[in-house]
Amino acid sequence: MPHPEAPKGARPFIAQDCLCCGSPRLAASPAVLMPFVAHRVFGWRPVEITEDWGLRTLRTGMAYSICNSLRCEDCGHLFLDIRFTEDQAKSLYKNYFDEDYAQLRDSYEPGYLARNEKLLAPVHYLDKIETFLAPLIDQRPTILDWGGGRGQNTPFSSTRARLFLLDISGAPPVEGAVIVDPVSALAAQYDLVICSNVLEHVSYPQDLMSDLRKTLQPQTVLYLEVPYEPVQRRCADGPEALLQKRHWHEHVSFFSHRSLKTLIETAGLDILKWELVDVGETPGEFYNFFVACRLT
């Protein structure tokens, strides 16, 4: 579950530079912001323009919230041009997956309620995460899971020493977990810091990486996991992905191999291990990047 970055002062509503490498060389293509997200973040609802509106120069039909898909021409990062503020992110993710969230989303995306039930369960590939990390950490690690929701997807549930959770959803944590905020999280030392399926949600990944870095000791392993989105995979991180990305939902960043590597190295981290892992219930359907890092 995503957690917004710490405030960094005034930010542009529309991105001007790449979120990963900082390059201003961005290509743009028109897209739409999905109505559920537009509703939760801005209170914007789709509307049907009919002839009785009397608008001479607009065609009749459904009107949705427009935006742009942006692609960095240097590192291949693909992302939404709109950058949500901290308060807007809180509006989107407050009470994540609860009944009100699910009902509203189902009204825009019929059939979502059944999917929501599955999303509340632990991910089915926790064993793959544990296999990836086990050679790099102590047998009884102290863990900080940044954006970890209730902690239902935190690995090593039977062997970890302690679990600290940092999250804005407000969901009750699993038994034994300690809730922290970005300040109190710095009071403990961790063997493993997890940021899993979070970076793709936040407006400024570089800021989140900076905040994560503050929680690390020289021996701490930082585990990052992000989707390798199908459109990036199909297009081999190439420019064709820009024209194929026509809508944006909660994932506002689609990482390429290069953009993720650049983000990590810019944060002053060394990559210890990197794998592209099949995480779909149907083989070959969905892949995530698994990355283990440490302070340089």
Image (cartoon, rainbow, N blue to C red):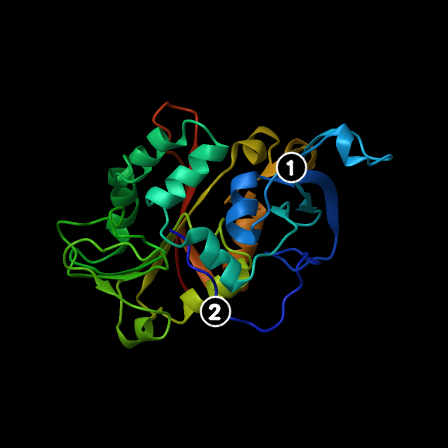
- Residue pushed farthest front? 52
Report if the CB atoms under discs 1 and 2 are less than 8 Å apart. Answer: no
Location of residue 120 (image quadrant): top left
Identify the residue shown where x is 41% and y is 65%. 212
- SS type, badge 1: strand
Locate residue 62, reporting x and y percent: 67, 31
Res. 162 mark: none
Indicate which disc, 1 or 2, sits on the residue closer to the N terminus: 2
Locate residue 255, reporting x and y percent: 54, 45
Image side of residue 172 versus residue 106, left or right: left
| Mark 2 residue crowding within 10 angstroms, few (<14) / some (14–19) / many (20+) | few
Closest to the observer: 190 or 187?
187
Residue 267 in view in this figure: no
For disc 1, the marked residue is 47
Residue 164 in view in this figure: yes
For disc 2, the marked residue is 6
Locate residue 194, reporting x and y percent: 34, 56
Image side of residue 73 versus residue 267, left or right: right
C-alpha distance separating marks 1 and 2: 35 Å
Amino acid at circle 1? Val
- SS type, badge 2: loop
- Report the mark closest to the observer, 1 or 2: 1
- Residue pushed farthest right? 56
Identify the residue shown where x is 57% and y is 32%. 231
Identify the residue shown where x is 76% and y is 31%. 52
Query: Which quarter of the rendered picture does the C terminus lie within?
Result: bottom left
Image side of residue 163 versus residue 92, left or right: left
